[in-house]
Amino acid sequence: MLLTVACTPCFYDMTKVAQKINNSPTLRWTVLGLVSVTMMMGYIVAKQMSPLQHFLESDLGWTSSEFGVLAGSRGFFNVFLLMLFVGGIILDKTGVRFAGVLSCVLMLGGTAIDYYAIAFMDPSQVLDINLQWIAYTDPSIKLQVLVAALGFATFGVGYELCGITVSKVVVKWFTGKEMALAMGIQVALARLGTGLALAGAPVLAVKISLSTPILIGLFSVGVGLIIYLIYCSIDRKNESLLHKATTDDDEKFHFKDMGATMKNPGFWLITLLCLLYYSALYPFLDFATKLMISKYGVEPSFAGLISSILPFTSIILTPLFGGMYDKIGKGASIMIIGTIMLTLVLAVFALPLNSSILAVGLMFILGIAFSLLPSVLWPAVPKIVPMKQLGTAYSIIYYIQNIGLMLIPIVIGGVLERNTVGDNVDYTQAMWIFTGIGVAAIIVSVMILLIDRRNNYGLQKANITKEKP
């Protein structure tokens, strides 16, 4: 007892020192850089198969439907085995360090399976199997495709867990500060990973081999694991000083608290908007490289560069829009603008206009839309959901998003298969499907604005708060 009393002033002094460390701009931006680069490495793998569709079909004899299975497989385990729910609970129960390392290990293992399938398996081995339960209607499928899909599905569990973990890390370190800017920078680096994959994968496939981009992706997620371990060391030291593990029970996860989140209409509207927005955007990006080749007559080695305009544009604009949201707010209004721009661009892609210059211009505009909505969507979640439920909330959002990311590529692959005559592919029907999803996203974003006015979530308010003296 005497020892406890004697050390009490020392404890308070150490807590004050720890709080200063925790609030240090240098430290929190360093943390942001570490976890953002980790996420960027995952994004390199997530999109490296998209620009390889042409080569998978020409070199390995894959069909558009088979490529659709691979593109959609990233969400198989997350959707059918509820792995995102499990991951969200693991995150809230064990913390960002364990969950983040686990996510990196899963990404590494899944990418290794992908590399084995593409580099070493015989594409002539075919299985007769019924996969109509995932909207795949062909009576047979290549064994190589199934193994690659298994790898991508394993990667997808780690990839999505990494996404919700990094989001919680940013909220943990930037609440009351430059949170939207921080999330914007994190998203920008993720887009850099996407851009590098889209632009670099076709070049590597032509110059070296089809499996080379996947090998580089395997190396990338390995580096990401090492970088995240460095963050864990920083976070562990900072948390031990703050004594959060033993003194802050209000921040601990409890299953009983999930009810409030599940009953929150704002949370479900944000979730639905996320589903619609990303179901229109990411599957479009999966097929965009082949679109540029088939509809606009672009050379295969150059088509990936046009697709990469979208992520590279967002690298600059997402942090810019995030910084604006931190200072002036208007998050719900920005969501409406972003969904309108997305829908208009997709509609123009559906029209019988075959100018490659127009395609480049549309991708620039789509890059702006690609920046606007994410810069406000993810920072909006902590305004609706308490910190202790944030991992679970993000996991629910990602889970429902994965349903769209799994099914839409398979559906679009089947639509394109039915609209293919020889080497000519008609993208009109597919693009109108994407446009219809965009219209639904506009409606939901308007509903978010209305419910924010009624429930006062603060989506229209700035994120930066003045610190108390």
Image: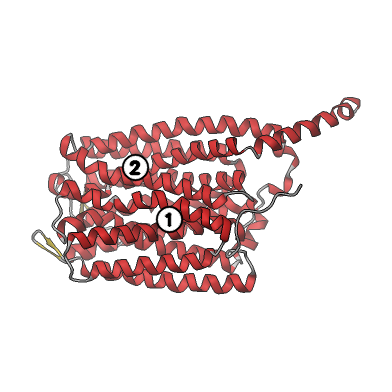
Q: Nearer the viewer, mark 2 or mark 1?
A: 2
Residue 421, horizontal then vertical, whole percent: 10, 64
From the viewer's perspective, tell me whether residue 355 is left or right of residue 411: left
Image point (26%, 63%), residue name: 412
Per the rendering, the mark at residue 197 is none
From the viewer's perspective, tell me whether residue 216 is left or right of residue 377: left
Secondary-structure class at tag 1: helix
Counting the numbered discs, the total is 2
Secondary-structure class at tag 2: helix
Q: Is residue 129 in view from this perspective? A: no
Q: Which residue is mark 2?
A: 45
Image point (57%, 60%), residue name: 328
Q: Residue furthest top?
A: 3
Mark 2 surroundings within 10 Å by alpha-carbon count, few (fewer than 14), some (14 through 19), many (20 or more):
many
On screen, residue 159 above or below 361: above
Q: Tell which of 80 and 158 is nearer to you.
A: 158
On screen, residue 393 above or below 149: below
Q: Is residue 349 in view from this perspective? A: yes
Residue 460, horizontal then vertical, whole percent: 58, 65
Residue 120, horizontal then vertical, whole percent: 21, 35
Quarter containing the N terminus: top right
Mark 2 / mark 1, whichever is N-terminal: 2
Image point (53%, 63%), residue name: 331
Image point (61%, 67%), residue name: 263
> What amino acid type is highlighted by mark number 1?
Val
Residue 100, horizontal then vertical, whole percent: 51, 39
From the viewer's perspective, tell me whether residue 82 is left or right of residue 137: right
Q: Which residue is mark 1?
A: 79
